[in-house]
Image: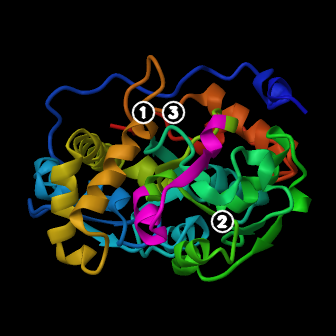
């Protein structure tokens, strides 16, 4: 199967190129009836220990949320399914969602009471990391090797597509699932040949392994797929769109600031109590530096804005590999005009 065939049936529906609306100038802050800052609870993608989650803290400390009349409570995320569960049960107001995993869950009917409102990462962050001295110089060299994965994680779900597009049979790879914090140590000891990770973790893994590593990025093979985004309940999007827009404006300002100023972002991250025990400032800074090209918006779109045609293509890719069984129309899943 070639990439040209991906999503052809979906794209034939003639979906509009992008979702969005004109930005308002000098927006009024959203406040509660007493005029106090409005509390918005948001979960991270995964935990609080990694520098890629610094953008919320940066936006908070730089006053971006306060300018919008918002204060935030940041709750550690545990991946898309748990994050959507927290959203469905009212534990959070805004959820960080892997966009592809969100498509899968929506198509299954497991979670349907949510909408995507903004793009955080315009490209997949997933990758496979190997030691540079391993003799594995290209993805197809992973055939017959031992790969550490997170069961049910997006990287694992997309691995068959990654493998087939790189010319090897995914069933020839032995998948093992040790605790994720042990991945680096196992790679260093040679107990696994490769690990699934995010590209931003390169510096941390090299530090743990004690030698150079080689990274095979999913985005090189599957450039059509988005990474993570922000979402909320359909009720909140419909009843309080100004609040959603205000939150997204501040969050995306924090994200842009963090990647433009990675050293400062790393320092803000490392000194904040919510990230205690997480990455030291230099490592968190490196994560934000590496994140910059993955944050960049598609040509002609604003930061955070969805391209519906691209999202339809993503759904087609997932369906081509049997990850979703029913067609998903992007306009079912994206709330227009709420990215900022």
Q: CA distance from mark 2 to mark 1?
A: 29 Å
Q: Which residue is mark 3?
A: 306
Q: Which colour style is shown?
A: rainbow
41 in the magenta segment? no
* Residue placed under numbered mark 1 in the picture: 337
The answer to whether residue 97 is visible is yes
Quarter occupied by the N terminus: top right
Left or right of 113? Residue 13 is right
Q: Nearer the viewer, residue 39 or 63?
A: 63
**Which label sits in the foreground, 2 or 1?**
2
Residues at marks 2 and 1 touching, judged by CB atoms closer than 8 Å:
no
Q: Earlier in the sequence, mark 2 or mark 3?
A: 2
Q: Is residue 272 above or below residue 179?
A: above
The answer to whether the residues at label 2 and label 3 have Cβ atoms under 8 Å apart is no
Q: Mark 2 = which residue?
A: 153
Left or right: where does residue 118 sit relative to residue 307? left
Q: Secondary structure at mark 2?
A: loop
For label 3, the crowd category at 10 Å Cα-Cα, with few meaning under 14, some 14 to 19 and many 20 or more, is many
Mark in front: 1 vs 3: 3
Range covered by the magenta-colored residues: 203-220
> Which residue sits at x=79%, y=50%?
141
Q: In the drawing, what numbered circle is on residue 197?
A: none
232 versus 279 height, above or below: above
Residue 325: x percent and y percent?
A: 87, 51
Q: Marks 2 and 3, Cα distance to the nearest angstrom?
A: 23 Å
């Amino acid at each position: 199967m070639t990439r040209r065939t991906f999503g052809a049936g979906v794209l034939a529906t003639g979906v509009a190129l992008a979702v969005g609306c004109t930005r308002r100038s000098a927006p009024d802050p959203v406040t509660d009836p007493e005029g106090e800052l409005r509390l918005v609870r948001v979960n991270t993608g995964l935990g609080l220990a990694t520098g890629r989650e610094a953008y919320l803290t940066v936006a908070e400390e730089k006053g971006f949320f306060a300018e919008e009349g918002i204060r935030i409570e940041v709750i550690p995320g545990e991946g898309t399914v748990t994050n959507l569960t927290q959203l469905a049960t009212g534990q959070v107001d805004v959820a960080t969602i892997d966009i592809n995993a969100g498509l899968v869950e929506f198509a299954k009917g497991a979670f349907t009471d949510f909408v995507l409102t903004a793009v955080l990462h315009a490209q997949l962050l997933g990758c496979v990391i190997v030691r540079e001295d391993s003799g594995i110089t290209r993805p197809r060299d992973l055939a017959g090797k031992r790969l550490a994965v997170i069961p049910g994680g997006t990287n694992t779900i997309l691995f068959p597509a990654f493998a087939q597009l790189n010319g090897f049979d995914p069933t020839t790879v032995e998948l093992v699932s040790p605790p994720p914090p042990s991945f680096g140590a196992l790679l260093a000891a040679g107990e696994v040949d490769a690990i699934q990770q995010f590209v931003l973790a390169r510096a941390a893994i090299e530090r743990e392994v004690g030698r150079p590593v080689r990274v095979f990025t999913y985005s090189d093979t599957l450039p059509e797929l988005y990474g993570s985004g922000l979402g909320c309940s359909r009720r909140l999007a419909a009843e309080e769109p100004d609040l959603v827009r205000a939150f997204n404006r501040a969050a995306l300002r924090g994200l842009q600031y963090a990647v433009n100023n990675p050293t400062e972002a790393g320092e803000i991250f490392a000194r904040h109590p919510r990230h205690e025990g997480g990455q030291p400032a230099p490592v968190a800074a490196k994560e934000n530096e590496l994140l910059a090209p993955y944050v960049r918006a598609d040509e002609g779109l604003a930061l955070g804005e969805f391209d519906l045609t691209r999202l339809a293509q993503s759904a087609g890719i997932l369906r081509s590999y049997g990850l979703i069984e029913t067609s998903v129309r992007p306009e079912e899943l994206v709330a227009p005009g709420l990215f900022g």
